Amino acid sequence: MSLAHFLPDHEQRTFVHKPGFALTGFAIHTHRDPQNVCSGEISELWRSYYQSGLSLDYCIRRPYLIYALYTDYEASGAYTFVIGHETAVIDRTAPIPRRSFSTEESERFRAWVPSSKYRIFRTKKGKVSEVVAQTWDEIRSFYESSSERRAYTGDFEVYDTRDFDPEAAEVCIYIAIR
């Protein structure tokens, strides 16, 4: 059963406090642009992820959960987008080194998702590219008129691949809040 089945409908308020965790994956630095999702660099990053075999790495925790992390937000609208998996951290006090972005090859990128309170939004069931984009539009609209404030420390989507059907997907989106 997928992770999304344990959460209420996307219309309801769902909050959770999550401790910080490390992700290892592949990343790009990009700018919010609706074209990036369907035909651009984010689609290419997903292709690189699927061709990498990263989920088979020995350091990966719960390889059936894929994270898509939005982090390092800038005032200009730029951000870092990471696709990957939760990984073990031996020394939580040591900083996690980050690799630079490479245009020639996909290098692994490590990111730390800080401890935070999150509001969880769940997509409707449908074609993954459509329901995720629609839910992000709803999230942006919600925060334009809400007194609740985003923290912009690291928001992420969680894809549970155990029962995943890209034509009938449900995805959980975690928004860090203050």
Image (cartoon, rainbow, N blue to C red):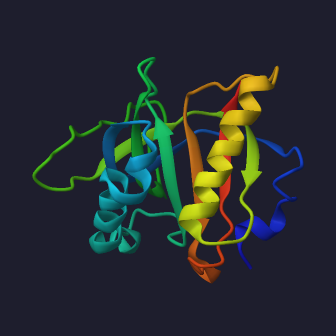
* 37 over 145 or under it: above or below: below
Horizontal and vertical percent for residue 105?
14, 56
Kindly identify the residue that appears in the image at 27 percent across and 53 percent down.
108
Horizontal and vertical percent for residue 51?
28, 73
Residue 121 placement, left or right of 23: right
Horizontal and vertical percent for residue 5?
80, 70
Number of residue marks: 0
**Residue nearer the viewer, 137 or 170:** 137
Residue 4 visible in this rendered orientation of the protein: yes
- Placement of the C terminus among the 4 image quadrants: top right
Using the rendered view, name the quadrant where residue 142 is placed. Answer: top right
- Placement of the N terminus among the 4 image quadrants: bottom right
Kindly identify the residue that appears in the image at 75 percent across and 64 percent down.
124
Residue 82 visible in this rendered orientation of the protein: no
Residue lying furthest left in this view? Answer: 104
Kindly identify the residue that appears in the image at 52 percent across and 56 percent down.
67
Horizontal and vertical percent for residue 60?
44, 64
* 31 over 13 or under it: above or below: above
Kindly identify the residue that appears in the image at 44 percent across and 36 percent down.
32
* 141 over 21 or under it: above or below: above
**Residue nearer the viewer, 35 or 19:** 35
Using the rendered view, name the quadrant where residue 10 is placed. Answer: bottom right
Residue 13 placement, left or right of 67: right
Residue 117 placement, left or right of 43: right
Residue 122 placement, left or right of 43: right
Using the rendered view, name the quadrant where residue 148 is placed. Answer: top right
**Residue nearer the viewer, 69 or 17:** 69
